């Protein structure tokens, strides 16, 4: 480097590619929406943690766990419903219903899912309550963050992180209980006898829950989650959202005393910043709609409390649509909540959601509990017998979808002069029909030989019919097949 380079002024600073995270310390608040969040949090966490322990009697041949994803047995149990691998379209239907349900909620209530029921919101809210219990409320948390690492701070941090870790471990543990018998796996976990994948899954979910709920929090909502960006395509001026009514709040008085000394000069907002202090993502709702707002409405609770204290009407920050806000600003009467929610778009989403649900319930209620499949063996396609007849071989699979063994009758339909026998039997036992016993909730695969006179079409269609006795009416399934003779192409 020469002297000129060493004394040359440096260029402009390089722009930052991302904004450094600012700590968010939400203040505790009480109100209608806070109590609603409490209720939803208790219900959702209760469902998640308790559901694997609920028992459901399906008889001696099936698991008694109410909700179970049995990967080993390739079954999905949900109370009285059992889904087989070939019925995966029901799971696809549930996922479609979940998607349409999110569209419905967004259309009617804005980002209510994000604000109340999203797992990130629920677990972050739980972690924040633990944080307040250990560190204190907002101001105490800020002071503790800035304080040096004394024994007291180390003790508080250790206590808080330990509780977070226990919650995270319970979260991972509850998840794996959906994939095995919960009481059995619970005992295996503590005895060191559980499969490695169980411990690995708990470890991964413990890490993600501890990290996302304890440290990343609002960054997940603002930067990682795609849902806020997708929602912008589904919301319009008629969608409910948390709204600051600037025509009523501006100009701000920066204190109640100035407003009292200058009546009619300032708006209702006294710039107390309580709406910012309680926000779990740390935004200022007075700056207008923004991606960081999850519409949890805690700012409404905080603002309503301040308005009560200063003697101003509630609703400076409120759930409202942009259309209703403009009407109210012009002095008109905005639409009622009922009119806002039950609008054509929301009703269309509801009709679609309900239609899918009803179709799935109908399909589940009327589905066959007995199926049969037959595949002809191609090497060889036929065998000429010593008595002049022709024999074909078939791989027949009979599925018993009930939780009890059933003795069924397998018979030929069509193919005049044809007889059959099981692969474990002999030609002397050939009949037009014979009985097979299929275990409970199982697929029975058996080899079946079919013999028929040589005279006839080179390729002749017939069918296998299986009939199982039922309480009200015998259940029957039919599988088309083709018998091959010499001369067939």
Image (spheres, rainbow, N blue to C red):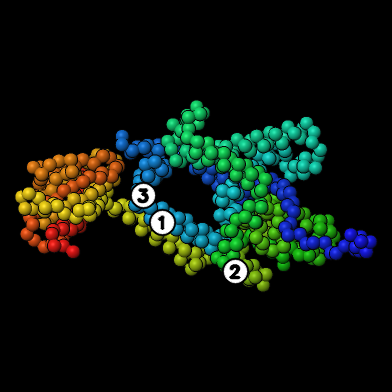
Could you tell me which residue is drawn at 81 percent across and 39 percent down? Answer: 147
Determine the image quadrant of residue 335.
bottom right
Q: Quadrant of the C terminus?
A: bottom left
Residue at 55%, 65% in the rendered image:
234
Measured in 3D between alpha carbons, the distance from the residue under mark 3 to the one under mark 2, in whole angstroms, is: 44 Å
Label 2 packing within 10 angstroms: few (<14), some (14-19), many (20+) = few
Residue 85: mark in rendering: 3
Q: Please tell me which residue lies in front, 382 or 333.
A: 382
Q: Residue furthest top?
A: 191
What residue is pinned by disc 2? 237
Left or right: 441 with respect to 92?
left
Toward the viewer: 40 or 367?
Answer: 367
Label whose residue precedes the other's in the sequence (3 or 2): 3
Q: CA distance from mark 1 to mark 2?
A: 31 Å
Give percent across and percent down for residue 378: 22, 54
Labels 3, 2: front one: 3
């Amino acid at each position: 480097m020469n002297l000129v380079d060493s004394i040359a002024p440096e260029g402009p600073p390089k722009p930052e590619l991302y904004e450094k995270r600012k700590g968010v310390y939400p203040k505790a608040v009480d109100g209608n929406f806070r109590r609603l969040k409490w209720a939803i949090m208790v219900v959702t966490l209760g469902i998640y943690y308790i559901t694997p322990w609920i028992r459901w009697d399906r008889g001696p041949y099936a698991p008694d766990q109410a909700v179970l994803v049995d990967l080993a047995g390739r079954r999905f149990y949900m109370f009285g419903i059992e889904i087989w691998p070939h019925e995966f379209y029901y799971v696809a239907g549930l996922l479609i219903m979940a998607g349409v349900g999110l569209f419905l909620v967004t259309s009617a209530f804005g980002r209510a899912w994000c604000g109340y029921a999203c797992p990130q919101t629920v677990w972050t809210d739980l972690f924040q309550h633990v944080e307040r219990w250990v560190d204190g409320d907002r101001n105490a948390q800020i002071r503790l963050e800035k304080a040096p690492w004394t024994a007291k701070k180390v003790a508080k941090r250790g206590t808080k992180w330990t509780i977070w870790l226990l919650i995270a471990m319970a979260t991972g543990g509850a998840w794996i209980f959906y994939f095995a018998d919960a009481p059995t796996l619970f005992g295996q976990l503590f005895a060191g006898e559980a499969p490695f994948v169980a411990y690995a899954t708990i470890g991964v979910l413990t890490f993600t829950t501890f990290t996302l709920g304890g440290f990343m929090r609002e960054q997940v909502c603002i930067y990682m989650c795609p849902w806020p960006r997708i929602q912008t395509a589904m919301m319009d001026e008629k969608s409910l959202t948390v709204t600051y009514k600037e025509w009523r709040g501006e100009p701000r008085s920066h204190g109640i005393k100035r407003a009292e000394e200058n009546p009619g000069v300032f708006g209702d907002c006294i710039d107390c910043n309580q709406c910012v202090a309680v926000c779990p993502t740390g935004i200022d709702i007075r700056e207008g709609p923004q991606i960081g707002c999850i519409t949890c409405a805690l700012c409404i609770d905080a603002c309503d409390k301040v308005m009560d204290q200063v003697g101003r009407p509630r609703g400076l920050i409120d759930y409202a649509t942009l259309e209703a806000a403009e009407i109210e600003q012009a002095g008109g009467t905005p639409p009622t909540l009922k009119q806002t929610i039950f609008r054509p778009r929301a009703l269309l989403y509801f009709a679609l959601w309900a239609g899918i649900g009803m179709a799935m319930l109908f399909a589940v209620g009327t589905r066959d509990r007995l199926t049969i499949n037959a595949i002809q063996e191609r090497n060889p396609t036929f065998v000429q017998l010593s008595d002049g007849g022709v024999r074909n071989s078939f791989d027949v699979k009979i599925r018993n979808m009930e939780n009890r063994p059933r003795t069924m009758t397998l018979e030929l339909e069509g193919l005049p002069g044809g007889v059959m026998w099981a692969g474990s039997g002999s030609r002397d036992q050939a009949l037009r029909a014979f009985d097979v016993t299929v275990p409970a909730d199982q697929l029975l695969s058996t080899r079946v030989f079919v013999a028929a006179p040589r005279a006839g079409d080179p390729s002749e269609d017939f069918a296998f019919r299986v009939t199982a006795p039922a309480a009200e009416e015998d259940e029957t399934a039919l599988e088309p097949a083709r018998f091959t003779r010499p001369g067939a192409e």
